Image (cartoon, rainbow, N blue to C red):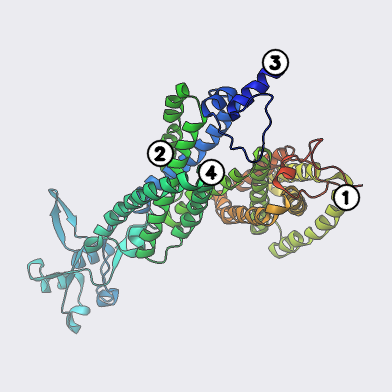
Amino acid sequence: MAGKERGERAAILGSTPSGGYHDNVQVKVNYDLALKYLGGFGPWQRRVFVLACLPIAIIAFHLFVIVFLAVEPDFHCRVPQNSFSELNATPAELLNVTIPWGLKDGVWTRSQCKRYSYNLSDTTIYATYRDFLKAHPVANRTQIPCDDGYEYDTSEYKSTVVTEWNLVCDNSWKVNLAKSLWFAGYMFGAVSGGHAADRWGRRPVLLASLAVDYVSGIACAFSANYTFFVAIRFIIAASTTVSTLALFVMVQELVSADKRSVVGMVIWVPHALAYVLLPGIAYFIRTWMWLQIAITMPFLFFIPFWWTPNLRKWTVNIFFNWIVNTLVYYGISLNTAALSGNMYLNFAISGFVEIPAYILSIFILNRFGRRWPLCLMLLFGGVACIVAFFIPKHLGWMTTTLAMTGKFCITASFAVVYVFSAEIFPTVVRQIGIGMSSMSARVGGVVAPFINLLGVYWTPMPYVIFGGTSVAAGLLALLLPETKGKALPATIEDGENFGKEDGIVDEE
């Protein structure tokens, strides 16, 4: 069997089993035999395929999100209020004398792009509503385009790019231009990305395009004007096209001929699922900037694609721990006003408990390592948060005590995860690893205030979420390797072998 295996490997590399390999000999790989050796769609190919499907789903969000980013709510011309301040009219009556009615598709509706203009005298300014109507009958009123901006109905959408830059009436064509330029970006990405992937390889181009997807997606959310918005979306379209094509070609090249049709079809299923999920996300996020950020942040978790399998899993785990620690830490710290008792005293206690948490962490790390302390701190803190708000209201002191216990534990776990991260990432990527961990943590900081708002619907909900995510992060921490007493990994290979017998060994 061993001889047969050597023979297969030699055939793949274009040499004989007993032949030697020399530096000056060019080895030609037989790709079909390599696939036969690996299997048509073996465990390794399946893992790669699943990983390839994830970005495909997130890319679908960006393709269709313009439907929700550019919603046009009901609107009408803004009218100078000081001109009618003494009219003593109701809001509905004020609209009757400022916004014209007209037929649209056979239905009488208020005009959205015109308003009435009056040459008001001192007499009419102080007239009653009825007197105003007599003095200015509809037939004698002058209609002009909106010259003082627009008023939008924000009952359903807090903000969209339409309301942000007044892309209505004479400027409504700009929404369609933004959609057209997106597909122009697609065309550019298809041409340039294909050439780049053939020249520099699928994997480097894919990783570069995923990084551009993330950076440009976040930049889009902070667009200062319409021009920047459409320009950055052009870049997003180009980079997501490169990512999509690179992923599709990679999975096609990884499997045998009889499996290509299967993977070629199944890879689009996550794309369709994302299509279905997007309305749900947009339903809960009614501000266009935050919606753009929400659909972009998942790209952050594809950065570990650069590394080998173990480091990739550990990196995602570490990122999640950073997010949860930040979420719970700031969630509790910024919500002390919801606790019973004196708010000023609660706030001071919330800060004070951090001091013993940091000091105790020194002993815990030296005595028990990193993995189990991180796990237990997150578990205890999570349970304390969940239980805290199920305590009867007349036992407010107990609620505060449990909340502060949760704050103590999450502070200690936050300190542990800092050290843990620095010891897991190899030297060659340690700085970027810590940097990306810190960046992912900002997700928790961004989300925490909004989770606190959920208390309006059900008082315990914020702390149930804080506690639940903390428990989940604690259990996942057990999948990380123990780093206590280990030499810091220097290379990617060292990091990949962390915890293995042939990997990093204990320092003497």
Q: Which of the 4 image quadrants contains residue 171?
A: bottom left
What's the CA distance linking mark 2 and mark 1? 49 Å
- The one nearer the camera, 237 or 492, is 492
Between marks 1 and 4 in the image, the one whose residue lies nearer the viewer: 4
What's the CA distance linking mark 3 and mark 2? 49 Å
- The one nearer the camera, 260 or 29, is 29
On the image, numbered disc 4 is attached to which residue? 203
Disc 3 or 4, which lies upstream in sequence?
A: 3
What residue type is disc 2 on? Tyr
Is there a contact, CB below 8 Å, between mark 2 and mark 4?
no
How far across and down, in percent of the image, does residue 481 sit? 76, 40
Disc 2 or 4, which lies upstream in sequence?
A: 4
How far across and down, in percent of the image, does residue 387 sit? 71, 42
Between marks 3 and 1 in the image, the one whose residue lies nearer the viewer: 3
Disc 3 packing (10 Å; few <14; some 14–19; many ≥20): few
Can the viewer see residue 191 in this picture?
yes
What's the CA distance linking mark 3 and mark 1? 49 Å
On the image, numbered disc 3 is attached to which residue? 1
Disc 1 packing (10 Å; few <14; some 14–19; many ≥20): few
How far across and down, in percent of the image, does residue 255 sit? 51, 27
Q: Which mark is residue 275?
A: 2
What's the CA distance linking mark 3 and mark 4? 34 Å
Is there a contact, CB below 8 Å, between mark 3 and mark 2?
no
- The one nearer the camera, 501 or 397, is 501
